[in-house]
Structure formats: structure tokens, C-alpha cells
Image (cartoon, rainbow, N blue to C red):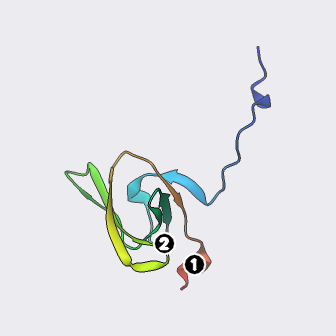
Amino acid sequence: MPNRSNKKREPQAEADSKILPMDLRVGDRLADETGEWEVIGRPYTTNAGKDARVRVQMVGQPDVTEIRIWRAHERVRVKHASAEENKR
């Protein structure tokens, strides 16, 4: 039987994780093909709790905001805001 402890896994940064959209917090950062976005509002659900929405703004451009929508069961890759960033 092969030894499974020899498998190497990529170390994932503690601050970078995949979470459900309803677990997003103000200050979390998302990245996609359009750029890096920061969560500026609390998430809320629509469609009987099946869709999750959150207001985000583009990092470095506070006048560019969007409402992002995910299915409530989808996981979102985020970088959590540190305690020092929340003090601003």
C-alpha cells in the first residue's frame, strides 16, 4: 500500500481561503479578471436564500462599485482583512 504521507500539498496562505458568500466581511478582498475588489457592505440573500449579494468597490478606485451575486452554496476565494486594516 502506498504511503500517503509522501504526497506534497501546496501550502495555502492562512489569509487566503474559500468561504461561502454569506461569510464575507467588510474589508475582505476578492480578485477576478476585472481586478481586485474590496467588500464594502454586508452580504444579503435574495430568491428565498438561494442567491447571495454583496456590494464591492474596486481597490484604489472608490467611485467604482458593483453588487456581486453568487449562488448561496458557491465558495468564494477571498483574502481576509487584517485587524490593522480594519482600524482605518
Residue 24 picture location, percent across and down: 43, 62
Category of crowding for the residue at label 2, using alpha-carbon neighbours closer than 10 angstroms: few (below 14), some (14–19), many (at least 20): many
Residue density around tag 1, few if under 14, some if 14–19, many if 20 or more, within 10 Å: few
Amino acid identity at mark 1: Glu
- Observer-nearest of 50 and 62: 62
Q: Quadrant of residue 8?
A: top right
| Disc number placed over residue 51 in the picture, else none | none
Q: Secondary structure at mark 1?
A: helix
Q: Can you say whether 72 is above or below 35 in the image?
A: above
- Quadrant of res 61: bottom left
Q: Considering the image in quadrants, where does the N terminus appear? A: top right
Query: Which residue lies at the image location 77% right of the left edge and 18% below the top edge?
Result: 2
Asked whether the beta carbons under mark 2 and mark 1 sit within 8 Å of each other, the answer is: yes
Q: Which residue lies under the disc numbered 1?
A: 85
Which residue shows up at 51% across the image and 58% down it?
A: 78
Q: Work out whether residue 10 or residue 64 is closer to the camera in this orientation and state it.
A: 64
Q: Position of residue 55 (x, y in %)?
A: 34, 68
Disc marking residue 27: 2
Q: Can you tell which quarter of the image residue 66 is in?
A: bottom left
Q: Is residue 83 above or below residue 76?
A: below
Q: Earlier in the sequence, mark 2 or mark 1?
A: 2
